């Protein structure tokens, strides 16, 4: 079983839910920027959903993450597929294909992904999973590090992706769809909940309030390493001790010791353009951390289009855990439409 790439698109990579345990060695988890969309796609086609890695070490089946536009693939055999995430007007042999629903892609048929009209990343899951070699127990691509996925890079014309073996009753999954009320909306002003960061007290009280009060626009230069946001400059409290200046420099956003920086960490270098660290980000950072986007809401951040706006909303650790439990309850058979 095989899927042939006719056009790689803007940036398409093989992703699962990422690799666990490497951050202490400086290896980012990688994986899907919108884990919810990939896991639902895998659920629909009968694949292991895996993740999130903060709860378990199963990365799930690998699929394709398509950024903004352009992927075109042809089925080398009959396949069961599902498309979730951003709306890219995907078409099967010229006919609109369903989203958030499993369907049969017959041998020789093509899927074409156009320009995203809402959301930034679409996901294509195939029953059996994209069967590229494991690297540190995951098939996720880290393109800048050139490891994982398909030859450690984004896909291009002529690539032939092997698909894992199918279950005996794989065609029975055709038609499975996510309940319509659970399909996310990526349009308009978005929100991302944030737990207060370890260095939030370094910012002035007014600046911290401004961080939550303003809508921030996604900088077009953002990527899977860091999502930069355009908005007002933030100020730091005065009176930085002399020893900190000597060790870390004059910039008040600099920290003497580079602390750990999990996915979702929001750093604000020099008080300008907060950066939400993504799934390909380094595991440490040297700038003041005003907050951390909770794991469930990294999907919303990952679906922002360039210059689309979002609010950061302060939440508690307890509410973050509750949100994770709610999401886990949705990635189950109970979310399949009757």
Image (cartoon, rainbow, N blue to C red):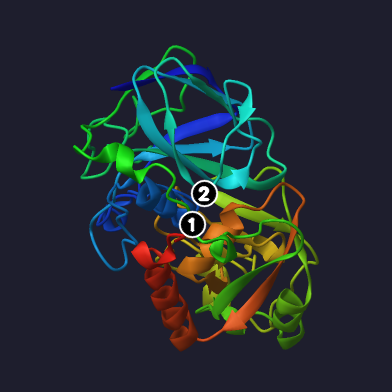
Instruction: Give the image quarter of residue 228.
Output: bottom right
Q: Which mark is residue 160?
A: none
Q: Position of residue 327 (x, y in %)?
A: 44, 70
The quarter of the image holding the N terminus is top left
User: Residue drawn 50% across and 71% down?
Assistant: 294
Residue visible at 54% across and 64% down?
182
Whole-number angstrom distance, CA of label 1 to CA of label 2: 6 Å
- Determine whether the residue tagged by mark 2 lies in a helix, strand or loop: loop
* Structural crowding at the residue carrying mark 2, measured as other residues with C-alpha within 10 Å and reported as few (<14), some (14–19) or many (≥20): many
Can you say whether 77 is above or below 136 in the image? above
Q: Residue furthest top?
A: 158
Q: Residue 240 is drawn in which quadrant? A: bottom right
Position of residue 317 relative to residue 8, above or below, is below
- Residue 112 visible in the current orientation: yes
Q: Position of residue 309 (x, y in %)?
A: 76, 60
Q: Residue at x 49, y 14 (%)?
A: 157
Q: Viewer-proximal residue, 74 or 153?
A: 74
Vertical placement of 151 versus 291: above or below? above
Mark linked to residue 178: 1
Q: Position of residue 204 (x, y in %)?
A: 71, 83
Mark 1 and 2 residues: CB-CB less than 8 Å, in contact? Answer: yes
From the image, tell me which residue sits under label 2.
100
Q: Is residue 247 left or right of residue 235?
A: left
On the rendered image, what quadrant is the C terminus found in?
A: bottom left
Q: Which residue sits at x=29%, y=47%?
A: 47
| Percent of width and height locating residue 50 | 29, 55
């Amino acid at each position: 079983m095989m899927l042939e790439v006719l056009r790689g698109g803007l940036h398409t990579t093989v992703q699962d839910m990422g690799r666990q345990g490497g951050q202490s060695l400086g290896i980012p988890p990688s994986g899907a920027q919108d884990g919810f969309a990939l896991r639902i796609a895998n659920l629909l086609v009968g694949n292991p959903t895996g993740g999130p890695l903060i709860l378990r070490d199963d990365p799930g089946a690998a699929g394709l993450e398509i950024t903004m536009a352009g992927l075109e693939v042809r089925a080398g055999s009959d396949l069961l597929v599902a498309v979730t995430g951003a709306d890219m007007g995907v078409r099967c042999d010229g006919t609109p294909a369903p989203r958030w629903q499993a369907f049969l892609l017959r041998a020789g048929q093509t899927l074409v992904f156009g320009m995203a009209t809402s959301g930034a990343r679409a996901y294509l899951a195939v029953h059996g999973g994209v069967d590229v070699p494991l690297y540190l127990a995951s098939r996720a691509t880290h393109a800048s590090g050139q490891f994982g996925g398909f030859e450690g890079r984004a896909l291009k014309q002529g690539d032939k992706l092997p698909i894992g073996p199918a279950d005996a009753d794989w065609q029975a999954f055709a038609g499975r769809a996510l309940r319509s009320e659970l399909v996310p909306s990526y349009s308009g002003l978005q929100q991302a909940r944030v737990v207060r960061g370890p260095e939030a007290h370094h910012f002035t009280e007014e600046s911290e309030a401004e961080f939550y009060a303003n809508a921030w626009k996604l900088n077009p230069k953002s990527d899977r390493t860091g999502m930069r946001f355009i908005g007002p400059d933030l100020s730091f409290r005065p009176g930085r001790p002399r020893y900190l200046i000597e060790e870390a420099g004059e910039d008040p956003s600099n920290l003497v010791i580079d602390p750990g920086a999990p996915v979702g960490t929001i750093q604000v270098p020099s008080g300008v353009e907060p950066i939400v660290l993504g799934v390909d980000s380094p595991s440490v950072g040297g700038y003041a951390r005003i907050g951390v986007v909770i794991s469930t809401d990294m999907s919303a951040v990952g679906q922002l289009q360039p210059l689309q706006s979002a609010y950061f909303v302060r939440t508690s650790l307890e509410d973050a855990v509750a949100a994770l439990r709610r999401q886990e309850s949705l990635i189950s058979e109970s979310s399949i439409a009757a």
